Amino acid sequence: DAGITQSPRHKVTETGTPVTLRCHQTENHRYMYWYRQDPGHGLRLIHYSYGVKDTDKGEVSDGYSVSRSKTEDFLLTLESATSSQTSVYFCAIRKALGQGIEETQYFGPGTRLLVL
Amino acid sequence: GENVEQHPSTLSVQEGDSAVIKCTYSDSASNYFPWYKQELGKGPQLIIDIRSNVGEKKDQRIAVTLNKTAKHFSLHITETQPEDSAVYFCAADSGYALNFGKGTSLLVTP
């Protein structure tokens, strides 16, 4: 258990409405990530954060914005949802493997978003 | 940027047989290669990883091999069991994030 929760877990919305997904971590890790997962595309990076108020774009950032006002929360916003944003969204954190300094990514349970 | 290719996209084996999934990457600077297992309705779970300073790593029935010269790495699962059925993803680091292959759906039939 990497101490990551995502909310909501499921959401149905209409085209043109704003949507915000929340990722919450309990362990104070610096790096947090948002990915989307679609059939035939695997996991693609949307945005990531390397600290409070420090964010950067990933491979598929168009139509998405993020915010990180405190270490534990990383928010993903779809300003005006489109049907192409129907997907499963995963949050991830980067944390150390075991007792060492080497790090890897751990994923949350995901949010299923359907845009009608 | 980093491009990760994964094959096959689907794999069906009989219980007890071995399964091999292969990935190639493009960025010679990548030095960390994790593998994830994803069961239906869940997030990807790290199962094994390898760094560029080693060529092979084993953990019970699973092993990963890395050939940095050829830029490919593979996941080997021996004595497969029905509970190994899942989607497996390889990934390569790009310095700040991971780039993922498109996944392999493994089905182990009793």
Image: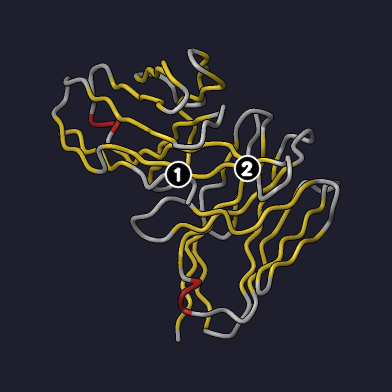
**A104 with respect to B11 (left or right):** right
Image quarter of the C terminus of chain B:
bottom left
Q: Identify the element where label 2 is drawn.
A: strand
As rendered, which of B4 and A1 lies closer to the eye? A1
* Residue located beneath label 1 in the image: A3
* Residue located beneath label 2 in the image: A104
Q: Residue at x 57, y 60 (%)?
A: B8
Q: Residue at x 52, y 83 (%)?
A: B14
Chain at tag 2:
A
As rendered, which of A40 and B75 lies closer to the eye? B75
- In the picture as drawn, the residue positioned furthest to the top comes out as A53
Tag of residue A80? none
Q: Report the Cα–Cα distance between label 2 and label 1.
A: 14 Å
**A38 with respect to B65 (left or right):** left
Image quarter of the N terminus of chain B:
top right
In this rendering, the answer to whether A61 lies above or below B82 is above
Q: Position of residue A88 (x, y in %)?
A: 34, 42
Q: Identify the element where label 1 is drawn.
A: loop
Query: How would you rate the neighbour count of disc 1 (Cα within 10 Å): few for under 14, some for 14-19, many for 20 or more?
Result: few
Type of the residue with mark 2: Thr
Q: Residue at x 59, y 59 (%)?
A: B47
In this rendering, the answer to whether B84 lies above or below A4 is below
Q: Quadrant of residue A6?
A: top left
Mark 2 or 1, nearer chain start: 1
Type of the residue with mark 1: Gly
Query: How would you rate the neighbour count of disc 2 (Cα within 10 Å): few for under 14, some for 14-19, many for 20 or more?
Result: some
